[in-house]
Amino acid sequence: MQSSALMLCIAIAIAVAFSASFCEAVTVEQLPDYCDEYSPPRCFKILRPVCASNGKTYNNLCLMCGAILRGNVPTDATYHEGLCSGHRGPHH
Protein backbone atom coordinates (compact mmCIF):
# COMPACT_ATOMS: atom_id res chain seq x y z
CA MET A 1 0.00 0.00 0.00
CA GLN A 2 2.82 2.41 0.84
CA SER A 3 4.54 1.74 -2.48
CA SER A 4 1.33 2.65 -4.33
CA ALA A 5 1.09 5.93 -2.43
CA LEU A 6 4.77 6.66 -3.14
CA MET A 7 4.28 5.95 -6.85
CA LEU A 8 1.26 8.24 -6.90
CA CYS A 9 3.25 11.05 -5.26
CA ILE A 10 6.08 10.60 -7.76
CA ALA A 11 3.63 10.62 -10.68
CA ILE A 12 2.00 13.81 -9.41
CA ALA A 13 5.39 15.47 -8.92
CA ILE A 14 6.44 14.56 -12.47
CA ALA A 15 3.13 15.77 -13.91
CA VAL A 16 3.40 19.10 -12.07
CA ALA A 17 7.01 19.61 -13.15
CA PHE A 18 6.16 18.70 -16.77
CA SER A 19 3.14 20.98 -16.97
CA ALA A 20 4.98 23.88 -15.36
CA SER A 21 7.74 23.80 -17.94
CA PHE A 22 5.63 23.19 -21.05
CA CYS A 23 2.35 24.99 -20.30
CA GLU A 24 3.40 28.35 -18.96
CA ALA A 25 0.68 30.95 -19.34
CA VAL A 26 1.55 34.21 -21.05
CA THR A 27 0.38 37.77 -20.46
CA VAL A 28 -1.95 39.65 -22.78
CA GLU A 29 1.00 41.77 -23.89
CA GLN A 30 2.76 38.62 -25.15
CA LEU A 31 -0.10 37.60 -27.42
CA PRO A 32 0.54 37.79 -31.18
CA ASP A 33 -0.71 40.86 -33.04
CA TYR A 34 -3.56 38.90 -34.63
CA CYS A 35 -5.06 38.52 -31.13
CA ASP A 36 -5.29 42.30 -30.56
CA GLU A 37 -8.97 42.52 -31.50
CA TYR A 38 -10.02 39.73 -29.10
CA SER A 39 -10.51 39.60 -25.34
CA PRO A 40 -10.01 35.98 -24.31
CA PRO A 41 -11.43 34.28 -22.36
CA ARG A 42 -14.58 36.29 -23.26
CA CYS A 43 -15.08 34.98 -26.78
CA PHE A 44 -18.28 34.99 -28.79
CA LYS A 45 -19.69 31.60 -29.71
CA ILE A 46 -19.13 32.05 -33.42
CA LEU A 47 -18.19 29.00 -35.43
CA ARG A 48 -15.41 30.14 -37.75
CA PRO A 49 -12.81 27.33 -37.42
CA VAL A 50 -9.10 28.02 -37.58
CA CYS A 51 -6.27 25.53 -37.73
CA ALA A 52 -3.34 26.41 -35.48
CA SER A 53 0.20 25.47 -36.43
CA ASN A 54 0.12 22.95 -33.56
CA GLY A 55 -2.34 20.93 -35.68
CA LYS A 56 -5.42 21.63 -33.55
CA THR A 57 -8.67 23.12 -34.81
CA TYR A 58 -10.27 25.87 -32.71
CA ASN A 59 -13.87 27.04 -33.17
CA ASN A 60 -12.62 30.58 -33.85
CA LEU A 61 -9.52 32.74 -33.63
CA CYS A 62 -10.51 34.21 -30.27
CA LEU A 63 -10.55 30.72 -28.73
CA MET A 64 -7.13 30.02 -30.23
CA CYS A 65 -5.85 33.27 -28.70
CA GLY A 66 -7.27 32.10 -25.38
CA ALA A 67 -5.31 28.85 -25.74
CA ILE A 68 -2.16 30.90 -26.39
CA LEU A 69 -2.91 32.97 -23.28
CA ARG A 70 -3.22 29.77 -21.20
CA GLY A 71 0.07 28.47 -22.58
CA ASN A 72 -1.47 25.63 -24.61
CA VAL A 73 -0.32 27.07 -27.94
CA PRO A 74 3.06 28.77 -28.52
CA THR A 75 3.05 32.56 -28.90
CA ASP A 76 4.70 32.22 -32.32
CA ALA A 77 1.88 30.00 -33.63
CA THR A 78 0.43 30.65 -37.04
CA TYR A 79 -3.00 29.63 -38.29
CA HIS A 80 -5.13 29.27 -41.37
CA GLU A 81 -8.88 29.49 -41.69
CA GLY A 82 -10.71 26.18 -41.79
CA LEU A 83 -10.25 22.78 -40.23
CA CYS A 84 -6.90 21.09 -39.75
CA SER A 85 -6.25 18.00 -41.85
CA GLY A 86 -7.10 14.90 -39.85
CA HIS A 87 -9.58 17.05 -37.89
CA ARG A 88 -11.12 15.26 -34.89
CA GLY A 89 -13.29 18.02 -33.45
CA PRO A 90 -12.79 21.64 -32.41
CA HIS A 91 -10.87 22.63 -29.31
CA HIS A 92 -12.34 25.28 -27.05
Image (cartoon, rainbow, N blue to C red):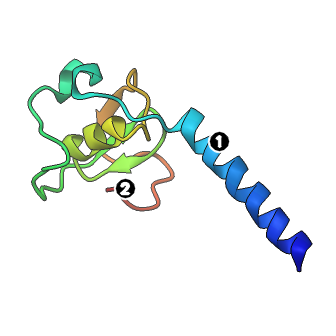
Residue pointed to by mark 2: 91
Are discs 1 and 2 less than 8 Å apart at CB?
no
Q: Earlier in the sequence, mark 1 or mark 2?
A: 1
Viewer-proximal residue among 90 and 81: 90
Badge 2 marks a residue whose secondary structure is loop
**Image: 25 above or below 5:** above
Viewer-proximal residue among 91 and 2: 2
> What's under tag 1, amino acid-wise?
Ala
User: At 27% from the left edge and 42% from the top edge, which residue is drawn?
Assistant: 66
Would you identify the image quadrant in which residue 47 lies? bottom left
Residue 30 x %, y % = 29, 21
- Disc 2 crowd rating (10 Å Cα; few below 14, some 14-19, many 20+) is few
Instruction: Report the residue that reaches farthest toward the bottom.
Output: 1
- Disc 1 crowd rating (10 Å Cα; few below 14, some 14-19, many 20+) is few
Residue 92 x %, y % = 31, 56
Badge 1 marks a residue whose secondary structure is helix
Residue pointed to by mark 1: 17
Left or right of 38, for residue 1? right
Left or right of 55, for residue 13? right
**Image: 92 above or below 27:** below
User: At 13% from the left edge and 25% from the top edge, which residue is drawn?
Assistant: 36
Would you identify the image quadrant in which residue 87 lies? bottom left
Residue 53 x %, y % = 44, 32
What is the CA distance from the residue labelled 1 to the residue labelled 2?
24 Å
